[in-house]
Image (cartoon, grey):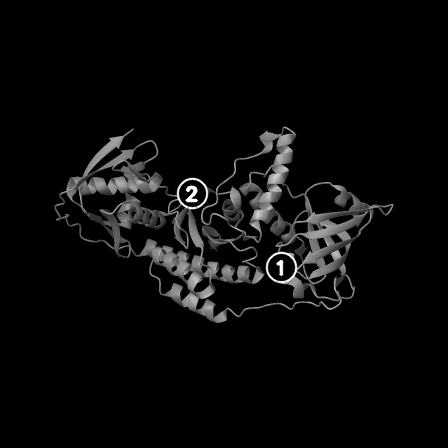
Amino acid sequence: MSTASPPAVALESIASCFEGIIPASICTCSRDGTPNLTYLSIVHRVDSLYVGLSYQFFNKTRENVLQNPFVQVVVVSPTNLHQYRLDLRYERTETGGAVFDRVKTRLDAVASQTGMSHIFRLRGVDIFQVLDCRPMNAETSGEGPSRVDYLSQIEEFAARLAACNGLESIIDASLDALSELFGYDHSFLMAPDEEGKRLFTLGSRGFSESGIGSEAWIGEGILGVAAERREVVRTTNFSRDVLYSNAVRSAVERRGEDSLLEREIALPGLPHVESQLVVPLVAQDRLLGILCLQSATPGRFLSDDERVVRIAARQMAASMALLERAESTKLQAISRRPHTVQPTATSTVKHYQADDSIFIDDAYLIKGIAGRIFWKLVQSYAQNGRVDFTNKEIRLDVSLQLPDFKDNLEARLILLRRRLQERCDFVNLTQVGRGQFRLDVQRQLTLEEQS
């Protein structure tokens, strides 16, 4: 352990300088004293005496550091544009551990989102001891940490979750509370599919389009990387990351190495995302979903926001796991009475066997497992007039070929219900009790099976 004296300005007091909102500059010198100045996208604060810089390319900066371990970095506060000079000494390069994993997850997520996974590969994190940190102007001092006391809001958030009686109410209560209690006005929640390959959107707030049913591949993009690694991904200046990626992409294309590039993945939500915070929902070592917050303001989500949302996400995951367990042990039977309404209008429901997609009057509704379930329900309605069903009978119906290694039925029913609410005004699924739901049909349905 180093016994060096602490810097004149504590790194904790200028925490916003290490968020990557404004690029930092770094000056190195070769062995013969020739200087080199360049820019860094972000300086990672490790603790009160150390910072880390990502090592991706063997460039002039890296070559100089290996020859001469003393460097200077200038970081800038995004709140008041004050500049601080860090005198650093290179100590080691880490290729594993907590710091490396945190930096790698963020880098890989942005690289995947912009189709640069084969270009941006973290080789290591160079760890530097901070010999001193001083303001560039004599009258400037440390800013002091700006802390917000969220204790009462967290208490209210937990109280709202405790009052929920199902997965759908957990989703709605959580997204509403994130906006009302914390001011996170743009959010959405995605759940993994039964095979653990994709995420699908179950709920959202604050967007012009809800995106219900939209999908993302696990392992791809910011959302998919966060889900795959079960790690938080926070970006504070996404447009700058994209500009940097595009500059490198152009250089790769000029070299004729297009095969290294991947397709770009369109982000759901805001058209111009600057800040994004993606937090996995994990309980009992199971990924139950991801929570994504977005903002058009650079630097909207800082370390305090990450801490608060981590707590909220753990509360959500615990509530989801608890209700899931109750659902599997306390399923009730209900009477199966025939539907008595005599609709006069007629609509056509088409089921395509290839991917279980459903079209109502030639308008796409849904596909996959949710589509298969819907087709079963409308068949029972058309043949027998049935409108009342239970989760248990759906789960045990072998004709549906539901995966038996992971039960995600309630999430699929929520997805189906919300897609119907958005796309169809004469067919609804209504929850009437724990593990019980009703198919409400206001038209005569004609069913067509397609290959």
**Rendered residue at 43%/49% (across/down):** 190
- Residue 60 placement, left or right of 221: right
Under circle 2, the secondary element is strand
Checking the image for residue 261, the label placed there is: none
Query: How far apart are labels 2 and 1 at the CA level?
Result: 34 Å
Disc ID at residue 78: 1
The answer to whether 96 appears left or right of 232 in the picture is right
- Nearer the observer, 110 or 220: 110
Name the quarter where the N terminus is drawn. Answer: bottom right
Amino acid under disc 2: Glu
In this view of the protein, can residue 25 be seen by the observer? yes
Left or right of 43? Residue 335 is: left
Q: Quadrant of residue 135?
A: bottom right
How far across and down, in percent of the image, does residue 269 sit? Answer: 45, 49
Q: Which residue occupies the foreground of this view, 410 or 72?
A: 72
Quadrant occupied by the C terminus? top left
**Numbered label tally:** 2
> Which residue is located at x 45 percent, y 61 percent?
315
| Residue 105 on image: x %, y % | 58, 48
**Foreground: 257 or 341?**
257
Q: Residue at x 19, y 43 (%)?
A: 381
Residue 243 in which image quadrant? top right
Residue 61 placement (x, y as % from top left): 75, 45
Q: Amino acid at mark 1?
A: Pro
**Sequence-earlier tag: 2 or 1:** 1
Q: Residues within 10 Å of mark 1 (few under 14, many from 20)?
A: some
Disc 2 marks which residue? 215
